[in-house]
Image (cartoon, helix red, strand yellow):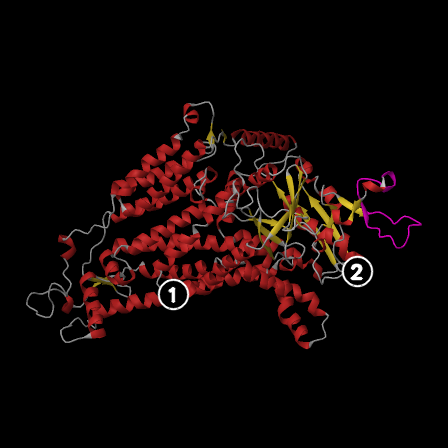
Amino acid sequence: SPPFLSSFLPSSSPSKALGSAFTSFTCGIFTYIWASPYGWQCYVDASDGKGPTPIHEKYWYNETISDCNWDSCCKPDRFATETIDIMGSEWVGILCIFVGLLTILLEHEDYGYGLWQPTDWMWYSNQISPLGLFYFLVGIPMFLAWPAAFAGVCYVCTFVCMMASHRFNEAGDGGRARRAGQKQKAKEAKAKKAEQGITESSPLAKCLDEAFEILCNWTVLPYILDAIRKDQLSTIFWLVVYLAINAFQFFYSLSIWVALTNGVSEALISGDIDINCDAKEGLDLAACQANEKLVVFGWLSPYAPFAKACGACLNLNCALIVMPVTKLLLARLNNAGLSYSKLEAGSNIFSQAFTVFCAGPLTRYLPLSKNIEFHKLIAKTTFFWAVVHSFFHFMNYAHASVGTLSKFEKFGWGGTTFLTGFIILFAMFMIYSAAPDRVRHALYENFFYAHHFFIIFFFFLLLHGPVFWCWSLIPLGLYACERFLQQFRGSRPFVVLRVEWVKPVMAVKICPLVKSDFEFREGQYLYLNSPYISDYEWHPFTISSARGDLSIPGRGSAMSQMRVSLTTGEEVVPVPRPKGLDPRFKWNKFVPISREYKHMEEWEFLEKHETAYMDYVSCHIKVHDLNAAVPRTWTRKLKLLFESMSATPFPYHYTRRDDRGDVQLGRILGPDGKKPLLRVDGPHSAPTEHYVNYKTVMVVGAGIGMTPCASVLSAQLKYRWKYGFPPEKLHFFLILQHGEIDAFQWFIPFMG
């Protein structure tokens, strides 16, 4: 499907429905409140805590005073006779609240529909989602009110998502059988404990455990607990620093806006605001006219300072959120830390000073390996501030609608800010609903394309916040530079040498035409893209080969010497020179490693020009969705692409002919010979590359996370220990489920 429509694919339908429920409930409350807005009655909240206080008498409309006319003074009954319509509705608000609560019940995995989509009913055969139709029908009336309209958009998106799930013939019991089995096991375990005299936890304790779990899922608490459990004091330190910066930003901005609102209120009460604009010109006239609007339409409510303080925190977090995923910055920091072991032995005083004050602390105290966790933490914090920011703005608008429109008119509050704010929230809805791990694991393409709503998010955020460009100039500039470099790096030519298959893992061996452009270290990763699948999808994979497997001139003896047959791709070994052969006769014969040269005729030997050095970079890719009738995952489509280019079974060995007609290893172009078969962006830094800084290393691999371990082990066994390079000791641990043992058969020949 097209990239934009991929954001509506069915894997995220439960998340979108629950997100719609949240927006429906909250927007319903504000829709109800906006139905009865407060008008400007010439009273302000005094800073001394005395409550509503009338403004100075000279600002009150009086027909006998010439300086205070209808257009420049306050008239208490002005907004009693002129209807204030801010597009609220009591019945639409009640509908939104009810639909939000009903959606939570309908999406419950046990009591509602959840992901339950049976195949034996008419809706499945007709490819129609009844729940999606319900969401569409209840979403239409929500467009009759301003706040509820956002919830209506969310419900329409959920409708599209659910209709897509039936269009793709997705079906299942929604995990009911699995959960029933788990409940039965829990019941049997409970009975067994009762037989042994072990008492169960009280209902109150279970309730507290559930509340604690919810707290862990939606706050920074899990990051702190995880850091304490792993004795990672540096992580705790940076968490405290991050939270402290947010708290400082909030209270500092709050104090400024509270002082401003209190100052204006006191000036209105004391009569210090000048509204006589007859003899004024230029900037003085503009300031005086602003004072007139202040008197006529009123000032902001006490909710406004809190909304602006939350907005200041959003400026900080929205600018910071791209930093942990900017690979250009991470590479620089990782490379500085990697220099630690090299500079430590240097005799130069500057290099040793860099080691002590920069490289060492970067490696030991800056948790670069937690960049994704930090990105998720900032995302959750951004979500919190966005919700609170919207809450206080909606409350402020309900209590001081005309004053708010008058004050922020120059920033687009004549309607533009509402529109940009709703678009920003919609972009967040699309991103956050596809961000959970279960969505990302089920269909990475959904996660990938939905995350690209960040373009809409930042574009309208620059229009929404008048000072956000100051915050985002450097972070967004670095990220834009990173995306440009990705396209540049992706344009470098790579050849696909060999593709191997050990279910469910596919090993892809590639090689850059210009090897010096791809200097990598063990543990790093790269991004792969195939234009025959999508021009925009880049998927990350860890490099599983050793650094020495790619022979780069100038690296020395620690490089691969493996040769393969140009015809079959099989590894070959040299045939010993026969005894008694005339010294003037040249001998460069090779034989496949699977055969014994003593049992072969001389004419069967391969000449040197029939072989080539096999320099490669390998990635082991777990192929998902193997049993689906229609391939949807990128890895499955890549496997089918390789299969379409070869008439023989795996392994596939690719060759090409150069301009002179000679056979060369690898293939650059795809089936039609027009576009590159694979594009590569990398290498990119990762924590594993720092293993060379230590004398003793423990390498632990779990699941597909085996690939960086394979790279490290291969480097040590094939190259580094041969030449005495650290680490001196390496302890390797593999953790996997018993049912996944077959999935790691590829590791045996790889290490062999």
Q: Amino acid at mark 1?
A: Ser
> Which residue, given by chain and number where applicable, does mark 1 sit on?
253
Residue 489 spot, x, y in % from top left? 56, 56
Whether residue 113 appears in this view of the structure is no
Secondary-structure class at tag 1: helix
The residue segment tinted magenta is 574-600
- The C terminus, quarter of image: top right
**For residue 292, side relative to residue 541 (left or right):** left
The foreground one among 4 and 686 is: 4
Is residue 583 inside the magenta stretch?
yes
Q: Which mark is residue 286?
A: none
Which x, y percent locates residue 751? 74, 46
Which amino acid, mark 2? Gly
| 675, above or below 309, in the image | above
Q: Left of 308 or right of it: where is 347? A: right
728 on left or right of 278: right
Q: Residue at x 25, y 66 (%)?
A: 265
Question: How many numbered callouts?
Answer: 2
Image location (x, y in percent) of residue 120: 46, 22
Foreground pick, 166 / 400: 166
The secondary structure that dominates the magenta segment is: loop
Q: Nearer the viewer, residue 603 or 142?
A: 603
Dot 2 corresponds to which residue? 724
